[in-house]
Image (tube, helix red, strand yellow):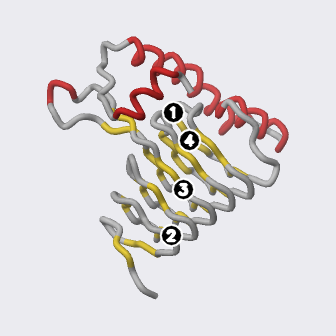
Amino acid sequence: MNSDLKTYIESGRVIEKDSPVYKYIHEVTAETLPLVEILNKQVQTETSKRELLEKIIGQALDASSSIALPFRTDFGRHISIGKEVFINTDVMIVDLGSITIEDKVLIGPRAMLISVNHPQEADLRRGLILKPVHIKKNAWIGAGAIILPGVTIGENAIVGAGSVVTKDVPDNITVAGVPARAINF
């Protein structure tokens, strides 16, 4: 991880649009987006798919983990994926602020994991605020769920389909709704 970006993630400071870090972000995105297009439109074999995914995320993908296509990301290099992870089709990972997916996580189709926000102040709105997302071991993110910046999903937790998660979810809890709240079955 770029040390300047790490500082912004840890501090929560706004990356202003004129910052040299902002330029670096655009350079990496310009490299990543064409690779994502190739991945989703031209990949023919499981081996070529895995090789391209590893190039996009900048690290090895454990053989026990699987990502269904199409797969979407904008930055790519701040995604960490554990073992026995399954990411279903058309998931979007906005990872500039970092996305950590621990072992045995299931992510349903069209879910979104978002680690980037913009300031509310109008004169700073083109800037970026980075907040990591952490999905802990054995969590299940339902189809179409949205996990917002700074959220941690606890171990064994379940996020219901279509939910919007704005706050941390404790271990062993099921949440659903907009905004997501704890529910009982």
Cα distance in 3D space between marks 4 and 3 = 18 Å
The residue under label 4 is which amino acid type? Arg
Name which residue lies at 82% across and 44% down: 46
Name which residue lies at 41% across and 34% down: 10
Query: Which secondary structure, mark 3?
Result: strand
x, y percent for residue 15 = 33, 24
Q: Is there a contact, CB below 8 Å, between mark 4 and mark 1?
A: yes
Find disc 2 in the rendering and name its residue.
171
Residue 72: assigned label: 4
Residue 121: image quadrant is top left
Query: Which secondary structure, mark 2?
Result: loop
In-front residue for pair 166/55:
166
Q: Is there a contact, CB below 8 Å, between mark 3 and mark 2?
A: no
x, y percent for residue 65 = 74, 53
The residue under label 3 is which amino acid type? Ile
The residue under label 1 is which amino acid type? Asp
Of circles 2 and 1, which is in front? 2
Query: Which secondary structure, mark 1?
Result: loop
Of circles 3 and 1, which is in front? 3
Residue 114: image quadrant is top left
x, y percent for residue 68 = 68, 52
Question: Reading the chain from its start, which is encountered first: label 2 or label 1?
Answer: 1
Of circles 3 and 2, which is in front? 2
Residue 135: assigned label: 3
Q: Is there a contact, CB below 8 Å, between mark 2 and mark 4?
A: no
